[in-house]
Image: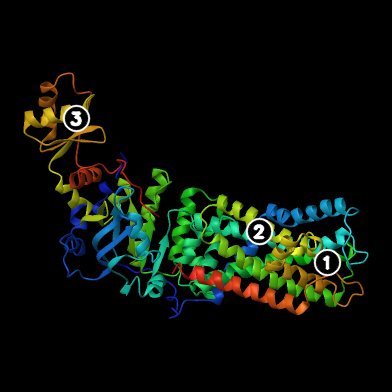
Amino acid sequence: MTTMPMSASPTRSTRPLLMRPAISLARREVTRFLRQKSRIVGAVGTPLLFWLVIGSGLRNSFRMPAVGGGMNYLQYAFPGTVVLILLFTAIFSMISVIEDRREGFLQAVLVAPVSRTAIVLGKVLGTTALAVGQAGLFLVLARLAGVPIGVVSFVAAFGVLILLGLALSGLGLLIAWPLNSTQGFHAVMNLLLMPMWLMSGAFFPADGASRWMGTLMKLNPLTYGVALLRHAMYFGASEQPGHLPSPLLCLVVTVGFAALMLFVATRLVQRSG
Amino acid sequence: MAHETCESEPETSDDVAAPTFERQDAAGSESTGDPVVVTESLTRSYDSRVALDAVNLTVARGSLFGLLGPNGGGKTTLFRILSTLLTPDSGSIKVAGFDAVSQRHAVRQRIGVVFQSPSLDGQLTVAENLEHQGHLYGLSGRTLLARVAEVLERFSVLDRADDRVSILSGGLARRVEVAKAMLHQPEVLILDEPGTGLDPRARAAMMDELMRVRDEGGVTVLLTTHLMDEAGCCDTLGILDEGRLITTDSPAALKRLVGGEVVSITTPNPEAFATAVSKRFDTKAAVVGGLVRIERDRGHEFVPELVEAFPGDVDSVTVGHPTLADVFVHLTGHGLYEERTQDEGT
């Protein structure tokens, strides 16, 4: 048997690879996204339209309860729209997990000598980069919406976006991982993710809601994320964004939410060997 | 019936296929020179159904080995265990010297896997797909780029390096799949039904590539198939049916198991006809896939007798040398393409 001259054999590490595969997987997410124009339109266009139509429609019928002062509905709904962009991107990423599984792509990653954590990290980092990129772009428009955002508050808000992006990508991954059809995911989106967003204070404040709704909103971790973003965007501003949980509580809950989602997603993926 | 392209070629004729390891495999001998895959009593069930039943498989290093069987026969389960995606219920499996369950990581470094469904990302170019693959296997930088160019060149797809995978033809995309699986220089290349979805020409080209992989790199190629043309190209075939490995031998040796020639008869009432023929000629006539099938020495001389004995009952008769499909019927009593009662879980 003749052996063909080949380049030197690859060095084989004794431990499953982590960072290089993770970064490569994350980069693939971004490249794919940028090459699918319809996804960009869907992920940014839908929330934008949502915000303009509902915001403009409710502008005069909506009065901020209690504090909030002169805030109109377009201003009120702005941070919620930013969070909706994050959520939509996480959802799109979720579909790609299911597609990757149905195609052989994910299987090929699973038979490679990579740590299962690398798969989670790659997916989550890629999704977060996309989500934060788009939401951040939208955040630049905040001044047009009348939100008095400055450099410091922009940077603070950007940090919150990263934190929320990690949490929602992790949540997306752990929902998508066990699903084997995109149909199942539509149910999850309508029954879990959209209500979670609607009841996060993104769409209406807890103050004016009925009692049981107010309780649900208090239990919803995303409520604290949206509130944290409001705190960040209005950081140092003279106007305040209305009745919100304290910044510290918001930060603790959001960090906890992100950590829990990433932990559970990692455990879930590790179970697949 | 598909053509068995490799049969006419000298590579798999008796004299060449005969020496060394294949024969020892066939005998189930323990003393096989250098086996690269060894399973012992490998068993796996899905719920109550046994998908693999105590399979003892030995694959010689540097051979082109085919697992032949119908859909639902256990091929996919064995493929998934070999590629470390599934763990067996009991029994042991060693791939390239490592335990495929407890030393999964080491096995993963040494196998290249081609799945039935495409694993290339259609949105990325051919080169980007391979670079990504390299990152998964710890390659990077200039070493990786050089290796990607080398492997694309070797599989004659270097000129398509910057094309997106989504615009490639089916045959070309499958070739890139193989190139991708060979990027990290695996010792064993495992493919699940590599010819499925390809036209016969593309399939023949694919088998040529796989024989080249075996010859030039000394790589062991292990594939699952239910297609005769692919099976005919293998050095050794393992016949897998209803979860059991029935036999292992070279295609030529397997065909010798079937005596003489195979006579197939189309008739309006096959069951009754088979019974009548069995009685009249003291031979074993069976109904397989709607045809009456008789294995017989000097089959061509038997045809006139048969037709005269049952005038009007015979719509058509064919006589042929045994094919691998005949071998399968001979060994299992049923056809390779007959619907099995249960689907294989995935």
Mark 2, secondary structure of its residue? helix
Q: Label 1: how many residues lie within 10 Å, few (<14), some (14-19) or many (20+)?
A: few
**Are labels 3 and 2 assigned to the same chain?**
no
* Discs 2 and 1 carry the same chain letter: yes
Q: Chain of mark 3?
A: B
Query: x and y percent of residue B306 in the render?
Result: 12, 26
Residue at x 29% of width, y 56% of height: B50
Looking at the rendered image, the disc whose residue lies closer to the viewer, 3 or 2, is: 2
Quadrant, the N terminus of chain A: bottom left
Q: Is residue A20 above or below residue A84?
A: below
- Disc 1 target residue: A140
> Residue A193 bears which disc, if any?
2
The disc numbered 1 marks a residue on which chain?
A
User: For this rendering, which residue is in front, B77 or B305?
Assistant: B77
Give the quarter of the image for residue B259: top left
Left or right of A68, for residue B49? left
What residue would you read off at disc 3? B271
Label 1 SS: helix
Looking at numbered disc 3 in the image, what kind of residue is underneath it?
Glu
- Dot 2: chain letter: A
Question: Marks 3/2: CA distance?
Answer: 60 Å
| Quarter-of-image position of residue B249 | bottom left
Could you tell me the amino acid type at mark 2? Leu
Of circles 2 and 1, which is in front?
A: 2
Name the spot of residue A132 as percent of width and height, x first.
Answer: 72, 67
Q: CA distance from mark 2 to mark 1?
A: 25 Å
Q: Secondary structure at mark 3?
A: helix
Kindly tell me whether residue A16 is visible in this rendering: yes
Q: Residue at x 36, y 53 (%)?
A: B207
**Could you tell me residue B278's position as x and y percent?**
10, 32
- Going by the numbered disc 1, the residue's amino acid type is Val
